[in-house]
Image (tube, rainbow, N blue to C red):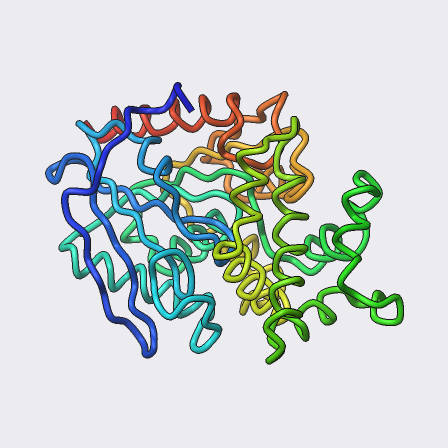
C-alpha cells in the first residue's frame, strides 16, 4: 500500500438517517474546496476501509466515503430490511444533497462499479466522471459462474471449503441454500455460512495469495454483513432489470470514464469490462496484465491512482 497517498483522517463525520431503520456513516477527507469524489465500496455489504481514502490526492479532492446500508459503521449491522439497489441510489443522492455538492466523481470497484453505473444512468446530470474497477454487471450468468459452477474449476481445493456448510442434497442451487442459512434464526449456522461465503471471495480476490485480504474477509463482522447482503441481493437479481446496465449505457454518453480490470480477475471476469467498454466507448479501458480482482494489487492500484490524478487534472 506504500504507493498510495499518505494516511489521512476525516475532517468531519456525519450520521445520516435515511429510510428506517438505517443510519449511514459518512465521512469527508482531504480538501473541503477540492473536486468532490464519492468512494462507492464493494460487496454489497463490504463497507469501507481506511486505505480507501488514499486513492485520491488530498490536496485536490474532497473525498467522501460512506458505508452502505447494513455494513461497516452504518446501522443496523447486516440488516436486509429496505435494502435494495434503488434505496442505495437514493442514499447517494441524499448524501450529495446533504453535503451541498452539485456534481461529483464516482469511484467504485466490483459491486461499487455496479452501483456507480446504476447511479450514473439514473442521474447522469450529477456525474462529472466515473473511475471503475473490477466491473460487475450483476447478470445471472456472472452469479452462476462464481457461486455455482465456473470459478470452482479453477480453485477446486478452495471450493471444497465453500461447499462444506451445504449438504450434498442442496448443492444444486448453492445460492438458495446459502440464503436459507444466512437468514436463519440459528446463529451458529448463520455465522458458519457467512465465514465460508466470505472466505471464498477473499481467497480468490487476488492473483497472488494475500493474507491481509483473506484476514479482512475472514473477520466475522465483515463476513456476516457481506455474506447476508450479497446473498440477499443476488437472490433478488440485484433488484435490476435483465441486462439493465448495458441496456442503459447510452445514458452515460458525455461522461468521461476510466475502467480498470485485472486480466486474471476470477470473481468478475474481464468479459464484463470489455462489454461495458463496447457499450460506453468514451471510457478508457486499462487491462492490468498481472492482477486479479482486488484494488490492493499493485498494478491495479497504480492504474487507479493514474486515473484519479488524470480526473483531477481534467477539472483543475
Is 86 in front, or is 172?
172
Which quadrant of the structure image shows residue 32?
top left
| Quadrant position of the N terminus in the picture | top left
Quadrant in the picture for the C terminus: top left
Q: In the orientation shown, which residue stands out farthest toward the left?
A: 33
Image coordinates of residue 157 in percent, x first then y, are 82, 42
How many numbered circles does the render carry? 0
* Relative depth, front residue between 199 and 238: 199
Q: Residue at x 51, y 32 (%)?
A: 260
Q: Can you say whether 65 is above or below 51 in the image?
A: below
**Going by the image, does 304 lie left or right of 196?**
left
Q: On the picture, is 8 further left or further right than 154?
A: left
Which residue is situated farthest in the right direction here? 169
In x, y percent, where is residue 48? 39, 47
Q: Residue at 79%, 48% (x, y): give it.
A: 159
Q: Nearer the viewer, residue 273 or 255?
A: 273
Residue 279 vs residue 13: left or right?
Answer: right
State which quadrant residue 6 falls in: top left
Residue 78 location, x and y as percent?
47, 67
Q: Residue furthest front?
A: 188
The quadrant in which residue 271 appears is top right
From the viewer's perspective, is residue 104 above or below residue 164? above
Note whether 179 is above or below 102 in the view shown. Answer: below
Q: Position of residue 91 (x, y in %)?
A: 32, 64
- The residue at 22%/34% (across/down) is 61
Amino acid at each position: 500500500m506504500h504507493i498510495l497517498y499518505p494516511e489521512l483522517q476525516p475532517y468531519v463525520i456525519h450520521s445520516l438517517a435515511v429510510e428506517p431503520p438505517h443510519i449511514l456513516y459518512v465521512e469527508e477527507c482531504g480538501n473541503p474546496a477540492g473536486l468532490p469524489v464519492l468512494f462507492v465500496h464493494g460487496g454489497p455489504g463490504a463497507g469501507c476501509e481506511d486505505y480507501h481514502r488514499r486513492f485520491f490526492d488530498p490536496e485536490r479532492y474532497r473525498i467522501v466515503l460512506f458505508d452502505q446500508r447494513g455494513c461497516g459503521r452504518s446501522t443496523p449491522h447486516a440488516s436486509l430490511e429496505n435494502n435494495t439497489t434503488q434505496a442505495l441510489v437514493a442514499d447517494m443522492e441524499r448524501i450529495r444533497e446533504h453535503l451541498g455538492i452539485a456534481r461529483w466523481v464516482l469511484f467504485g470497484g466490483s459491486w461499487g462499479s455496479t452501483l456507480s453505473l446504476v447511479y450514473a444512468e439514473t442521474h447522469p446530470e450529477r456525474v462529472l466522471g466515473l473511475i471503475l474497477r473490477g466491473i460487475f454487471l450483476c447478470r445471472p450468468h456472472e452469479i452462476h459462474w462464481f457461486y455455482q459452477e465456473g470459478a470452482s474449476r479453477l480453485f477446486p481445493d478452495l471450493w471444497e471449503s465453500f461447499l462444506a456448510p451445504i449438504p450434498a442434497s442442496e448443492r444444486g442451487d448453492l445460492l438458495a441454500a446459502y440464503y436459507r442459512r444466512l437468514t436463519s434464526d440459528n446463529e451458529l449456522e448463520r455465522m458458519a455460512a457467512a465465514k465460508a461465503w466470505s472466505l471464498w471471495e477473499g481467497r480468490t480476490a487476488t492473483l497472488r495469495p494475500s493474507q491481509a485480504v483473506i484476514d479482512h474477509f475472514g473477520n466475522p463482522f465483515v463476513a456476516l454483513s457481506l455474506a447476508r447482503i450479497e446473498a440477499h441481493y443476488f437472490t433478488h437479481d440485484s433488484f435490476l432489470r435483465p441486462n439493465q446496465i448495458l441496456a442503459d449505457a447510452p445514458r452515460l454518453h458525455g461522461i468521461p470514464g476510466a475502467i480498470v480490470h485485472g486480466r486474471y480477475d476470477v470473481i468478475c471476469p474481464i468479459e464484463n469490462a470489455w462489454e461495458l467498454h463496447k457499450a460506453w466507448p468514451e471510457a478508457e479501458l486499462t487491462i492490468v496484465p498481472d492482477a486479479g480482482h482486488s484494488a490492493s494489487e499493485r498494478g491495479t492500484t497504480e492504474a487507479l491512482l493514474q486515473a484519479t490524478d488524470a480526473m483531477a487534472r481534467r477539472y483543475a
